[in-house]
Amino acid sequence: MHFLSLLTALILALFSPLASAANYTNPLKTTDGSDPHIAWSGGYYYLMTTTWSNLQITRATTLNGLKSGEKRTVWTDATASRCCNVWAPELHYLDGAWYIYYTAGNSANLDGQRSHVLKGGATPWDPFTYLAQLTSTWGIDGTILRFSTWGNYFVYSCFSGSLQSLCIAPLTSPGKLGASKVLSTPTNAWERVGNPVMEGPAAMYHGGTTYLSYSASYCWTSSYSLGLLTWNGSGDPSLSASWSKSGPWLTSANGNYGPGHNGFFQSPDGTEIWNVYHATSNSAGACDGSRYTMAQKVNWNANGTPNFGSPARLGTSYVGPLGE
Ligand SMILES: *[C@@H]1O[C@H](CO)[C@@H](O)[C@H](O)[C@H]1NC(C)=O
Ligand SMILES: *[C@@H]1O[C@H](CO)[C@@H](O)[C@H](O)[C@H]1NC(C)=O
């Protein structure tokens, strides 16, 4: 190594904030912490959760800082068809702008739940305007799944007959879907406790492999947990035959029940993948605002598969994402 670059490396190692991380404890959000999603961008974590009535973003420069971060309500909507039961918001960056994909419906019941998208600006802190309704039938918890060769897809929870399943459609533009197909149905016993359910999909990319996590079983049970679909690397991603299913991975532990509906985000230094999810202290499980937000690092097994660990007792001190 050249002397000057060695010197530069030493100086960087000594003084760069990228060499350290602040500690944090769970939960990051104590109530209305359901369906969490975090994006890291431009020096901030941006956290969104289900609040039922509107869309809110909390931002902070450290994970622990989200507990008392700056908060902004970015969307309320009086339109009858999408006024209410506002669920599962996620921030995604596409074609130079941030978008919020979310679920909303009418006030009468949950049969009107549809997927919608707002368009924002160059940072997640810019204002949002309504862009489009994405599904014409019941469709919740939508997320973006990206492929370098196949393009972008929208994956969401849909009904296949009586089975709450995962559907997939090409995202032809940020506000428009191509034809939807059923990607996977809840066929394993651990996906059918209470009700057969697959929901809350989240994409993860690591070591050249593309994964889709999802939440399995009914949320009012302690069996709500994470399952995993792994893409085979070559087949059409909209065909279930191109994916293999495994699970359950993240399950109830240490007084945290029904861990699930997760999102993935990168550490500020880009070297780690983190998992943000909700759980409840109710041993019967919960689908309501009692759920709190937890985060922990994704580890990797020797054979390259992800290890989601288990939810630690609340208040356990962890080293935060590298680069904070
Ligand atoms: C991937 O899945 C497709 C089916 O969609 C199959 O035709 C192909 O052989 C599979 N490839 C590998 C490497 O398993
Ligand atoms: C930070 O977390 C680490 C790992 O969990 C722990 O060993 C350490 O005691 C924590 N530090 C503080 C100040 O809590």
Image: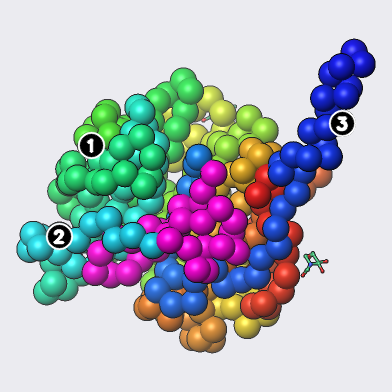
Residue 195 in sight in this render: yes
- Give yes or no for residue 85 being in the magenta stretch: no
Give the Cα separation between the discs numbered 1 and 3: 47 Å
> Which contiguous range is marked in magenta?
43-70
In the picture of the structure, the residue carrying the numbered disc 3 is: 10
- Please give left or right for residue 145 compared with residue 243 in the image: left
* Residue 54: quarter of image: bottom left
Number of the front mark, 2 or 3: 3
In the picture of the structure, the residue carrying the numbered disc 2 is: 77
Q: Residues within 10 Å of mark 2 (few under 14, many from 20)?
A: some
Quadrant that contains the N terminus? top right
- Give yes or no for residue 47 being in the magenta stretch: yes
Label 3 CB sits under 8 Å from any ligand 2 atom? no
Decide: is 130 above or below 169. Answer: below
Instruction: Assign a secondary structure to mark 1.
Output: loop
Give the Cα separation between the discs numbered 2 and 1: 18 Å
Residue drawn at the location 25% of the way across and 41% of the way down: 119
In the picture of the structure, the residue carrying the numbered disc 1 is: 175
Decide: is 222 above or below 179. Answer: below
Decide: is 290 above or below 16. Answer: below
Q: Position of residue 130 (x, y in %)?
A: 17, 46
Q: Position of residue 280 (x, y in %)?
A: 51, 79
* Residue 208: quarter of image: top right
Q: How is the image coloured?
A: rainbow
Residue placed furthest toward the bottom: 283
Label 2 CB sits under 8 Å from any ligand 1 atom? no
Q: Position of residue 140 (x, y in %)?
A: 30, 56
Residue drawn at the location 43% of the way across and 61% of the way down: 70
Residue placed furthest toward the left: 80
Mark 2 vs mark 1: which is more N-terminal?
2
Q: Residues within 10 Å of mark 1 (few under 14, many from 20)?
A: some
Residue 278 in sight in this render: no
